[in-house]
Amino acid sequence: MHLHAYLRSSETIINLYDGAIPFASWLKNYFREQKKFGSRDRRMVGDLCFCYYRLGKAFEEYSLTEQLLIGQALCHDKSIFIDELKPEWSGVSSGTLKDKLAFLLRENNGVVFPFLDEVSNDIEKDAFNLSHLVQPDLFLRIRPGKKEIVLQKIQTLAVSFSVEGDCLRLPIATKIDDALEVDKEVVVQDKSSQRVLNLLQHQTSNTECQTFSAWDCCAASGGKSILLHDHFPQVQLTVSDVRESILHNLKTRFSRAGIASYQSFVADVSSPQFHLNEKFDLIICDAPCSGSGTWGRTPEQLRFFSKQKIEYYSLLQKSIAVNAGKCLKEGGQFLYITCSVFVKENEDVVEYILQQTKLRLVKQQYFEGYDEKADTLFAALFAL
């Protein structure tokens, strides 16, 4: 396909996509139906679209074609689209990141992230804003006892990688399924997600050899539960979520991960009617959220996310946290987690928990990933 054909195809795709499902999934389905796109075509068009979404709404006054080209200039060190169609921008595209950012700020106000007024003051907003122009890396967590075999296998992929403890960093497009046993040897988990239980680690040294009960009340795909199990194999684990299908998928994943001893139940913890007789030593509340700390991976959210949803998530989180907190044993710990950067989903929820429960705050912090090509998470540890 010619460069102009790639641009036209990208424009067609952008005009068709409505944000209802993640763009990566939607695009895969689109390419499956449109047989004319070869592998190179899919790669070129996909990159054009993703770089366009990375701009957020910063260049809305430009034509769609111009925005596609601006995305190439800002997100790549070198782009054939810039070399051929915008040679006057080649100095920007091939320059340093500082040059690119200077270009962005000169041409526009530079606001890529659309809701900076909602972002916590603990976040360095300029760096966070501009980090969305950079594609995050792929992170794997090496499971206990698997480091030697994983590092041997990773050599066969012939890709650059780095290791920090049990955290393995790879290029985002790395195909790992043929080389590694996912969930058994490694878990696909962002660097910040791997660190979030560090708040807990400092508080549980006296229980490292003792059995204790833990409830992951919004288990979703189970990443935090597997992480908890790997840190504390003696944990008596209970998981719940709002749909049976989620728990079914979780059962399959736990089987791959070698986790056989656990309890599960379906529950809407946000409901006023929620009640549970059992109490736990530890509750992990990885609450549903806007995901705004992860939009570098789903940049279409920069255009499609509605500000009104922040209030929706905040109310949901408050209900879940207060209801779940009632199930904590005296002397227990409650860990509240989101992958959001919004005050209303984080600090405001912490204040609400303190007002509505007997929990006391031990520590809260952001796990910043925006300067490491990783996600940004928030966590707050409470005790009773």
Image (cartoon, grey):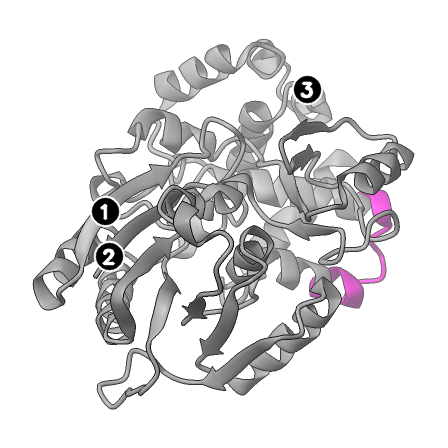
Residue at image coords 38%, 35%: 112
* Marks 1 and 3, the one that precedes in the sequence: 3
Which residue range is magenta in the image? 29-40
Residue 193 lies, with reference to residue 359, above or below; the image says above
Q: Left or right: 296 with respect to 177?
A: left
Q: Residues within 10 Å of mark 1 (few under 14, many from 20)?
A: some
Residue 362, which numbered label?
A: 1
Q: Residue at x 59, y 49 (%)?
A: 189
Please name whichever residue, 93 or 332, is drawn nearer the observer in this view of the structure: 332
Residue 357 against residue 124 in the figure, above or below: below
- Identify the secondary structure beneath mark 3: loop
Instruction: Tell me the element at label 1.
Output: strand
Residue indicated by mark 3: 78
Q: Residues within 10 Å of mark 3 (few under 14, many from 20)?
A: some
Q: Amino acid at mark 3?
A: Lys
For the residues labelled 1 and 2, say whether their Cβ atoms are less than 8 Å apart: yes
Neighbour tally class for label 2: few under 14, some 14-19, many 20 plus, Cα within 10 Å: many
Check disc 2 and give the amino acid type. Ala
Which residue reaches farthest right? 156
Marks 1/2: CA–CA distance: 7 Å
Q: Nearer the viewer, mark 3 or mark 2?
A: 2
